[in-house]
Image: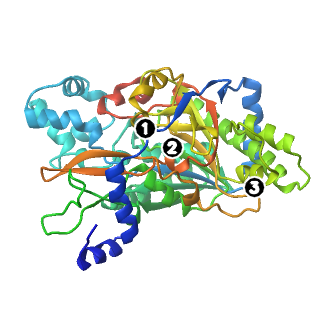
Amino acid sequence: MNFSQQDVEQIKNHGLDLDEVNNQIEKFKSGFPYVNIVKPATTNDGVIECDETSCEKYIKKYDEYAKSHNILKFVPASGAATRMFKDLFDFISSKTPNKTSQQTISNIEKFAFYDELKTYIDKNSSDINIIENILTDIGLNYGNKPKGLVKFHKYESGAKTPIEEHLTEGAEYAASNNTVNIHFTISPEHKQGFISLLNRVVPEYESKYGLKYNITLSEQKNSTDTIAVNMDNTPFRNADGSLLFRPSGHGALIANLNDLDSDLIFIKNIDNVTIGSLRGDTIKYKKVLAGILVDLQEQIFDLLKNDNQDIDTLHKFVTTKLNIKLDKKLSIDEYKKLLNRPLRVCGVVKNTGAPGGGPFWVMNLNGKCTLQIVESSQIAPDSKHIMNESEYFNPVDLVCATKDFNGEKFNLNEYIDENTGFISEKSKNGVPLRAMERPGLWNGAMANWNTVLVAVPGTTFTPVKVVTDLLNPAHQTKMS
């Protein structure tokens, strides 16, 4: 592709290089290959189910570990609430009521943000006016805020945002050395809103729990953006002739994760929180997942530090504990290379038909069959029947270990499958374009990690994808 000197300077200033941009354009032309899914991961075939005795053992294991190790809670929180309110925006623009707008209006007093909304509306306000006061800057302006700053839950002490619920979660399962370390990934336009809320509420939570909070923020790096192209795969240009670069989705957050230094990292989306009275399962199973990871990591480190291991022992561990199916035995060095990788333990919930990814056995180009989290867009049409048979769903509930047996950080960029991702059609100022999303954080960006899947109850998965999800029992506090 021929770029002008001005283009090259723009690419360089964006943190990219010409080869990378040319590779992206070639990927637009060739597309991403579908993931070769073999079968769904099921109970006792890729997914572990823990009985109560095992749960207690792993919780105890984690609690002991947390006393002497650095724990971090990583919360992707850069998403705007725009999708959450899509149907309400449609109602404003069309003036035609839809199911979501009608359900919102008829239950308006049940929302945690209602008390604040009341300062902008009265009993004579029209339905349109009420929704406008929820979404626009004449009122709450929620349509232009991130989910993290939307009031989700109502308590006698006041309404709470997801940010505050994550502060509570952090105190209850992610405290170490009397400190709760939480890292939020945010969008630059919302940074001040996060800082203002945190400055106001963190002292309250420190007093409540007797803990110190260490809160850090990061933004998605420009260097992880991808170029946008026209429908003929030539570079898309803005009105001033400059190139258009777009954020490349959740997968880009692997760069943010790679910058962090911690012994154990919990990962959970900003909107997956529940009310306090129902939080018990979340706390319990977060600790169970962490205990399983700690137990497994100890076994891996023992194998790596022992120079006298035999092939049979290594083969059995890799195939049964790390779920890597091999068609032949490897050398000791090859087994140890498989062992010496980042490790993640992922909670999965029973599939109830919700859209999104799930856990599958996947055959890679090297002939290894491993467990992966795969999104529906990565699956070939003629393999959709395998997806439909899936017993479990991916709730984005991960516990990760990103250091090797010497305590050195892995370079997480080395474990990405660059052949995963997808291309979608978007528009800019009414002009159609093609956009590229990099490998997702929990699928392609972690494709070459060691992966263990554990069944967790559906009560630990309570995301808010649309505003009316806040009317579900998981988000409705019974006020006395």
Of discs 2 and 1, which sits in the foreground? 1
Instruction: Estimate the x, y position of residue 76 in percent, counting from the top left.
Output: 45, 50
**Residue 152: image tag:** none
Residue linked to disc 3: 68
Distance CA(mark 3)–CA(mark 1): 40 Å
Q: Answer yes or no: do the residues labelled 2 and 1 have beta carbons within 8 Å?
A: yes
- Crowding near pointer 2: few (<14 within 10 Å), some, many (20+)? many
From where the camera sits, is residue 480 visible?
A: no
Q: Earlier in the sequence, mark 2 or mark 1?
A: 1
**Residue 378: image tag:** 1
Quadrant assignment, res 347: top right
Residue type indicated by callout 1? Gln
Of discs 3 and 1, which sits in the foreground? 1
Instruction: Estimate the x, y position of residue 153 in percent, counting from the top left.
Output: 39, 35
Distance CA(mark 2)–CA(mark 3): 31 Å
**Residue 443: image tag:** 2
Q: How is the image coloured?
A: rainbow
Residue type indicated by callout 2? Asn
- Quarter of the image that includes the N terminus: bottom left
